[in-house]
Amino acid sequence: MSGPPARRSPGHGRSRSVVPSDHYRGHVSESPAERRMRFAPAPTGYLHLGSARTALFNWLAARSVGGTFLLRIEDTDLERSRPELVDVVFEALEWMGLDWDEPPVRQSARLDAHQEAVEQLLAAGLAYWSDPVAESDRDRTGGRAYDVADRDRGLGPGDGRAVRFRVDEAALGVSSVGWQDEVRGDITFDLEHIEDFVIRRADGSPTFFIANVVDDVYMRVTDVIRGEDLVNVTPKYLLLRRALGAPVDDLRFAHLPLIVNEQRKKLSKRRDDVSLLDYRDRGFLGEAMVNHLALLGWGPPDGVEVRTDPLAEFPPVFRIADVGESSATFDVAKLRHVDAEHIRALGSAHFLARARPFLEATPWADRFRDETFAGVAADVQVRVETLSEVPDLVEFLFVEDPPVDEGAWAAAMADDAPAWLGVLAERMPDWPWRSADLHERTSALAEELDVKLRKFQTPLRVALTGRRVGLPLFESMEALGREECLRRIGVALERLEDAGS
RNA sequence: GCCCCCAUCGUCCAGCGGCCUAGGACGCCUCCCUUUCAAGGAGGUAACACGGGUUCGACUCCCGUUGGGGGUGCCA
């Protein structure tokens, strides 16, 4: 089932209509101080929760400093990069309400540039052709999948031969690489622990390492904000950048803590619900998701966690340096709470608009009526945590005979219940049909019969809704209408009679 | 194995040498309100991993241990 298109309401200042590929701001600042952050997802068919958080933090970082937020689709893996998969990325970002400032760059369109970079490194002697080393032959190379001796063999292109970057202290003139990470401080790697990594595969395709760097240089990225799982490739990134003669001094890195599951492991596609859009389909609001994601690894200085419009309210107080450094558990219970708060904050018209896709997916969609729903909308809002819970709460209003919870029936219809229903059926025809009046009349009747309203209302509720718990009774009665209430009481009475005889 | 990172309530976030008998949020528990259930209100439960330093003084700084995570691909 495809998800309902829950859309942000307009008015948060940055939302705009769809058409993803044209969805960018036209300005290109030439200011030297311009800060440029990018989100560079691979189109895998779904946007991973962790990626979504990375996108959000890049966006927040950009917006918080007046920088530029860029998009690059890393679609060089042709197999997994069909156009519709790219659309999923746009759709997900749209759902979160994130906008980007320049046309997205397709990595696949930049293959020539990547090749050129490889050639350049080859020509400079910083890269070399390398033959694979068979598994059985690894003791010769110290367990490595390549032979360092190839560095100086002067090999040329050949079957099965890849190009490796030469991580050589002498050639590079340094013995370690490090950087001042915006969130984690100093991080340093000794070159001796970095292998000669492949930058061009035997099939001619450039690897992530080279493509990533070349494209970042091309896009003039100044702030690399990504997941902690990429810290260990940063030395390679730096090495390549220097080797290519690209500026490195004003570069900033920020490695975000990973989002983990209850087992403290990195979220995995197999075990965890990692697809962002699945949460939309499960009834979560985009702004609630964004709100919750922002709270993983970061918190607003004033401590007010739930914001009606996080994309408007967070940028002014967001600072990438405030991001925490330990991994954060994705807690669905907390998400539900945040979502519930966002739902309650919705105006009733918006609430219906947001819930509509879920209502339309029900078997009784054709009998749904806006006016009827409006009568109880506010009562529904405070009782659901996600939009997908809405239909269940109002179903009784739109089906002829709501399913009866037998347990509730048995418990509610004992003792005097049948008699009460009988009296109710007698009196109700004369009652004014507004919830306040219904409340008053029912209370009075309960008092007359010397029962607590608390107890008295139960059989009535079960007769009307089939359940023991649900929306406030009198509001429900008003929405249902006198005729229908009397009819359902009649049905209940009949059933009681049948059972009794 | 090797490399890198992390370490405050069950979970998320505060604390950035004295304001901490450690604060807020979620969850959980109790009570109040109440037409059920919610929502709301008032309480409660619960943490500085351990060991050394540094200091007049450490949750806060340093070192180590332990624990956890990430990486170690011709994936990205």
Image: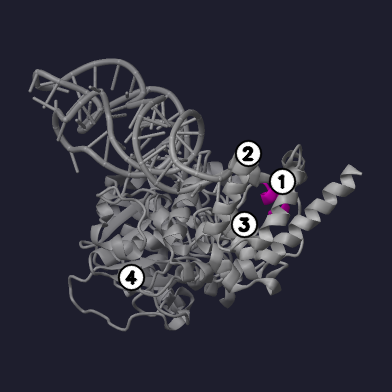
Residues at marks 4 and 3, CA–CA distance in whole angstroms: 41 Å
The numbered mark, 1 or 4, whose residue comes first in the sequence reads: 4
Q: Are marks 1 and 3 on the same chain?
A: yes
> What element does badge 1 sit on?
helix
Tell me the mark number nearer the camera, choosing from 2 and 3. 2
Per the image, the residue denoted by label 2 is A451
Numbered disc total? 4
User: In the rendered structure, the residue with mark 1 lies on which chain?
Assistant: A
The span from disc 2 to disc 3 (Cα, nearest Å) is 27 Å
Q: Judge left or right: residue A89 versus residue A56.
A: right
Q: Quadrant of the N terminus of chain A?
A: bottom right
Whether residue B42 sits left or right of residue A286 in the image: it is: left
Query: In terms of sequence position, does the residue under pointer 1 or pointer 3 come before the other?
Result: 3
Q: Which mark is residue A420?
A: 1
At x 51%, y 42%, the residue is A265
* Distance (Cα) linking label 1 and label 4: 66 Å
Label 1 or label 3, whichever lies nearer to me, is 1
Q: Viewer-nearest of labels 1 and 4? A: 1
Mark nearer the viewer, 4 or 2: 2
Q: Are marks 1 and 4 in contact (CB under 8 Å)?
A: no
